[in-house]
């Protein structure tokens, strides 16, 4: 006897999975259901990863499809109670259903159907509760072809099993059981004429002549309706034999057949008339004529009702068509009441499709719902940012609209974009509902909208779908590399690690010592949850880099070495992450390897053409590497991509202006930035340099006093230790500026 299975899997008549003792498991991922069904019916219950991706994600690139397969396997892993009893065993190349843990109804059905015992056949037909994976509707030609073929095969096997069972029951004298089996057979496969014929014979054998004749009429009507054909000669002969048999021969009780027991013939049997008709023939002709009249009246009535229904339906369709033509032709598709205009836009409209992803609204009662909604918004923005033929506003510039009622045309005009993507996220336990709309702000038309009801573990797949739907709606053609990067933007399958890393990034961007320490803890937690998550490792590396840059640790050198170790680990796990290359560029800048620093940062920009942050990092590196003019150009581009840019963009722009001798522009930019964070030293130091070099020594000394107010222990030598100028004369000039402004050594 086989050992009991941990899981039961039902595929016939619908999908159901349970864990012993037959406790149903909620399992709504359709792709995962399809994968389990496919594996169950494959030879040896296994397939390659390529076969699975071609079957279920054939419309996606290879990397996107493999990513979706990983998500699917993750959702299956959520169902399993532990690593000792997985539903699917997967390695680098193949997937296999774990038959040691999973019992499948199709396997039992096929095994029992091959048996010759009545008890086994009865169990087999009991297992066939309906077609394979009934109700599962997935788009995809490959899957649909496979599923249709398997459904036909299993239905035919069920029909053969019923036919075999009926024959054995009849041989054993169980006529009523055989009749019941025959009725199940014709219900399963009404087009199987042999089944109708067998059932007619069984009913006749049981003395139910009227039932046999009625079954013939059912068969004949079905054939005319479906094929415009008459029954086979063998069926007609059986019908004639039953119909012509005398009542005495039928039942032995001498009871004459009633009118209802005498169906009309399908076609009269030809033959010469011999002698005058007998009284019996005369009486029978009266019965037949009466029946003919009854059927004729019924036919007329049915025809009239059909014509009436068709007429009503035609009128309804005509009215509906008129309404729809008016609605879409005159009224047009759904649109905003107010639209944006290029004349009112704060920035010139880019030539390529331009878009902003507004913060998704959190509709959850879950306290983690807000963080989840932010992570979804940033995930979609990051994925869109890798597309070179688009213009995508940076996520941090949308935070000004978070939690506020906004007008689409106002957002478009303030940010200078044509398209706005907005949506909402509702998280309820292990399920999510995501609603999205893409709006053309210049026309007010909703270009695309979609609702997603999924398991929470499918959120990465939902992000991919939203991103690809937006790209498709904007008619943007992806390059091969961009196709890969779009689906890999999130970099992890672990939902909690992904949310923690997103929260860590918000702390990291504030660039204070306290926020940096908080970010480090969040990233550390994320690495424990998913050690293969590159985003968690490069975020952790950034925290050590900031320690090295601003002197927040006991040893700048130790922090810098640790930052590079972590960055290399992130790069091994995610070779195409823009932020990791920007990180490596920043590390090499502090190491004094300026050419390598520029190369790494330029690689980051090439991987994320719409990445405002990586452009700003490259600009920072160039300002220290002796190319301030390029630095200004890149910072202006970064500010356009992120109109509500981080304040450190301004600090670096002020430095680049100063290095170019454009002191007035440097001072104006830096003075405007002081009010954002009055207790920040960096903008005051940059402003002080511009004032000293432009001859405004009194104002520079005032800034020096403010620096000492903020940090009484400020040291010129300590500050200069973190400056990575390629040209040492620039560093020497800054040292001289600080001394002239009255700051201590």
Image: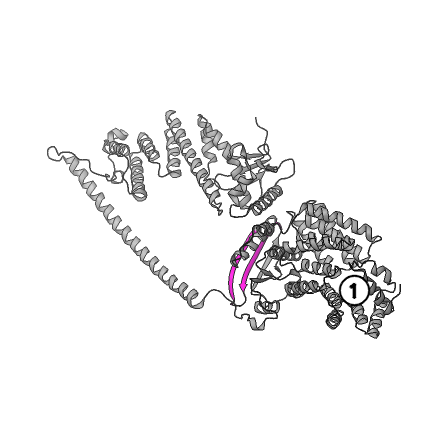
Residue 691 in the figure: left or right of residue 278: right
- Asked if one can make out residue 517 in the rendered structure from this viewpoint, the answer is no
Label 1 SS = helix
Residue 170 versus residue 186: which sits nearer the camera?
A: 186
Residue at image coords 72%, 47%: 568
Q: Is residue 700 above or below residue 521?
A: below
Residue 181 versus residue 476: which sits nearer the camera?
A: 476
Q: Is residue 431 magenta?
A: yes
Q: Quadrant of the N terminus?
A: top right
What segment carries the magenta color?
429-453
The x and y percentages for residue 298 are 26, 48
Residue at image coords 82%, 56%: 552
Residue 545 in the figure: left or right of residue 142: right
Q: Residue furthest right?
A: 745
- Asked if one can make out residue 50 in the rendered structure from this viewpoint, the answer is yes
Q: Is residue 461 above or below residue 94?
A: below
Tell me how the rendering is colored: one colour
Magenta highlight: main SS: strand
Q: Is residue 444 magenta?
A: yes
Q: Quadrant of residue 72?
A: top right
Q: Which residue is mark 1?
A: 682
């Amino acid at each position: 006897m086989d050992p009991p299975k941990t899981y039961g899997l039902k595929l016939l008549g619908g999908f159901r999975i349970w864990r012993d003792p037959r406790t149903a498991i909620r399992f709504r991922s359709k792709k995962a259901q399809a994968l389990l069904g496919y594996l169950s019916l494959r030879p040896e219950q296994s397939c390659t990863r390529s076969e699975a991706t071609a079957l279920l994600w054939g419309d996606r690139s290879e990397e996107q499809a493999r990513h979706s397969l990983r998500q699917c396997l993750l959702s299956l892993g959520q169902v399993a109670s532990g690593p000792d009893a997985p539903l699917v065993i997967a390695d680098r190349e193949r997937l296999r259903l774990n038959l040691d843990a999973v019992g499948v109804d199709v396997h039992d059905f096929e095994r029992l159907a091959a048996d010759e015992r009545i008890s086994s056949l009865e169990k087999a037909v009991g297992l066939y509760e309906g077609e394979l994976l009934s109700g599962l509707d997935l788009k995809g030609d490959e899957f649909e072809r496979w599923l249709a073929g398997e459904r036909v095969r299993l239905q035919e096997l069920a029909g053969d099993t019923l036919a075999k069972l009926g024959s054995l029951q009849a041989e054993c004298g169980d006529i009523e059981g055989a009749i019941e089996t025959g009725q199940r057979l014709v219900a399963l496969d009404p087009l199987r004429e042999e089944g109708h014929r067998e059932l007619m014979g069984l009913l006749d054998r049981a003395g139910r002549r009227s039932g046999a004749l009625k079954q013939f009429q059912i068969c004949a009507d079905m054939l005319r309706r479906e094929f415009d054909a008459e029954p086979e000669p063998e069926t007609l002969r059986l019908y004639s034999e039953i119909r012509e048999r005398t009542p005495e021969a039928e039942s032995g009780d001498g009871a004459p057949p009633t009118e209802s027991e005498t169906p009309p013939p399908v076609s009269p049997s030809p033959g010469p008339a011999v002698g005058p008709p007998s009284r019996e023939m005369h009486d029978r002709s009266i019965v037949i004529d009466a029946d003919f009249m009854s059927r004729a009246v019924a036919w007329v009535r049915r025809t009239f009702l059909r014509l009436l229904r068709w007429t009503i339906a035609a009128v309804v369709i005509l009215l509906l068509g008129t309404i729809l033509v008016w609605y879409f032709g005159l009224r047009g598709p759904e649109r905003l009441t107010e639209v944006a205009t290029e004349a009112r836009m704060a920035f010139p409209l880019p030539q390529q499709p331009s878009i902003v992803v507004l913060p998704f609204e959190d509709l959850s009662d879950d306290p983690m719902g807000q963080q989840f909604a932010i992570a979804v918004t940033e995930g979609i923005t990051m994925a869109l940012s890798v597309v070179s033929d688009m213009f995508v506003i940076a996520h941090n510039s949308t935070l000004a609209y978070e939690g506020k009622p906004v007008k689409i045309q106002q957002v478009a005009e303030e940010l200078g974009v044509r398209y706005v993507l907005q949506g909402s996220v509702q998280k309820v336990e292990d399920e999510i509902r995501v609603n999205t709309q893409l709006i053309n702000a210049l026309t007010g038309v909703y270009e695309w909208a979609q609702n997603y009801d999924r398991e929470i573990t499918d959120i990465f797949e939902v992000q991919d779908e939203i991103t690809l739907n937006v790209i498709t709606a904007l008619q943007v053609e992806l390059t091969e590399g961009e196709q890969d990067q779009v689906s890999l933007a999130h970099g992890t399958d672990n939902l909690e690690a992904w949310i923690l890393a997103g929260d860590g990034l918000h702390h990291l961007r504030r660039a204070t010592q306290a926020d940096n320490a908080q970010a480090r803890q969040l990233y550390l937690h994320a690495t424990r949850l998913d050690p293969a998550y590159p985003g968690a490792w490069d975020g952790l590396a950034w925290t050590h880099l900031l320690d090295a840059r601003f002197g927040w640790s006991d040893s700048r050198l130790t922090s810098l070495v640790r930052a590079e170790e972590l960055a290399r680990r992130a790069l091994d796990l995610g070779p195409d992450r823009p932020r990791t290359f920007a990180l490596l560029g920043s590390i090499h800048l502090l190491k004094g390897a300026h050419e390598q620093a520029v190369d790494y940062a330029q690689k980051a920009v090439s991987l994320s053409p719409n990445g405002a942050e990586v452009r700003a990092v490259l600009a920072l590196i160039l300002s220290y590497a002796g190319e301030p003019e390029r630095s200004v150009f890149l910072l202006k581009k970064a500010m356009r991509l992120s109109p509500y840019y981080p304040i450190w963009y301004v600090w670096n722009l002020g430095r680049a202006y100063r290095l170019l001798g454009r002191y007035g522009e440097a001072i104006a930019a830096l003075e405007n930035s002081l009010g954002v964070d009055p207790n920040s030293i960096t903008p005051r130091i940059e402003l002080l340099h511009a004032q000293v070099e432009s001859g405004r020594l009194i104002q520079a000394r005032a800034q020096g006093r403010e620096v000492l107010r903020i940090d009484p222990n400020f040291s010129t030598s300590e500050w200069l230790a973190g400056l990575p100028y390629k040209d040492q004369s620039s560093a020497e000039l800054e040292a001289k500026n600080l001394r002239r402004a009255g700051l201590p050594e």
